[in-house]
Amino acid sequence: MTRTAFSPSLHVADLRLEAPAPAPADAEIPFARLDHADSELLHELLAAVARVAESGAFTLGEEVDAFEREFAAYCGTEHAVGVSSGTDALALALRALGISPGDEVIVPANSFIATAEAVTLAGARPRLVDVDPASHLLTADILAAAITPRTRAVIPVHLYGCTVDLDPLTEVARSHDIAVVEDACQAHGAHYRGRRAGAVADIGCFSFYPTKNLGGWGDGGAVVTSRPELAERVRLLRSHGEQPRYHHHVCGSTARLDALQAAVLRLKLCRLDGWNAERRALAARLRSALAGTGVGLPPKPDPHGDHVYHLFPVFSTARDALRAHLGEGGIATAAHYPVPIHLAEAYRHLRLRRGALPVAERLAQTTCSLPLWPGMRDDQIDRVAAAVASFDSKRRPGWRPTTSS
Ligand SMILES: *Cc1c(COP(=O)(O)O)cnc(C)c1O
């Protein structure tokens, strides 16, 4: 792309964005694809960014208001509040619920570390628990067994885009008077019993990190809820507890969604369902192409749930060798997540030792996420599957953590 000199009025139409030549069949397959690789989308997004830049309204304002209305409507909640990241969305949701020092919040050890960090940021203590060996997710039974007199909330994580079976879990939470905060940072647009992920429980949290199913051009997040007092509290907390200007009611933070991000997200929200449909179709193709190879396949959602395949993990006891093999074939992979939260140095003070949460530990050692992104071609999916199949699965037997076919 040619660089344009800055001019007071940026004419995006003047930017020459050439469509990249289609990748040759043997080109590297990246792990994910970002917006700059789609010249038509990039052009549209640049025009939206230019519009905000020329308005000079960079913080909150109309663009953020409009995104909040549109995202709430999309999720089917009364309110959406734009914040600066998924981590802040979770931390502010917990604070809005009144979680404070001395409280405990139940968090699955098989998640991105931010789920636990948010609890720490809110001043409370994460109580890390193991996940179900079949679904790799939190369940009602796991929750019931972990509740203590100090437990005030639980954060089920719709990991990799697969929904947690929330109704039984919520029932357990209700009967113990603890709040449910959905971590939907990997599940934008997924359905559960006709509702959207994030909109099922008391409050739901999203990240718009660039690689997420709905991603901005930097960091961003949102909290969704239909409880007006929670939405109002998050609104206060994200901006110094201020209402109106220079009148501070609670000790808050600088945790607002940028107007530039909102402009990008508004345009991409219109395409989210289409992209998720593409992800499901690619995942179905990959799933059937991988059947019979030595690797374990990702668990399927429960009959009331959904999967939007933020990631497509496979499982192998020879994970590192599998990743090296795929890398030699020009296929990028990732390990999500190589260290379970309870064994991270940051959480050593919780004193959970190796062996304490065996399913999460096993997953950390065996998970290999394969490339999957909207716009990926069938021949690229087939190449990924063929490369996995050619890995010596006899010498390195795959671990099958699930009974789902
Ligand atoms: C990305 C992510 C977060 C944190 O979001 P950030 O925007 O990176 O702060 C939290 N939980 C899960 C499960 C995530 O994937």
Image (cartoon, rainbow, N blue to C red):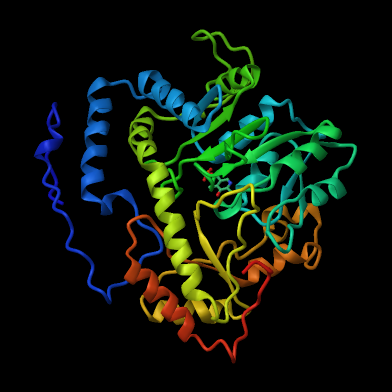
Q: Position of residue 262 (x, y in %)?
A: 38, 31
Left or right of 140, for residue 251: left
The percent position of residue 304, horizontal first and vertical second, equals 64, 47
Residue ID at (22%, 31%): 50
Judging depth in this view, the residue of 18 and 188 nearest the camera is 188
Q: Tell whether 366 sits left or right of 134.
A: left
Residue 158: percent from left, percent from top? 61, 48
Res 125 seen here: no
Q: Residue furthest right?
A: 149
Q: Is residue 268 visible?
A: yes
Residue 5 sits in which quadrant? top left
Q: In what quadrant of the picture does the C terminus appear? A: bottom right
111 w.r.t. 383: above or below: above
Vertical placement of 55 versus 243: above or below?
A: below
137 up-or-down from 42: above or below = below
Quarter of the image for residue 175 reads top right
**Residue at the image point whose x is 62% and y is 40% from the top:** 193
Q: Residue at x 90, y 37 (%)?
A: 149
Number of marks in the image?
A: 0
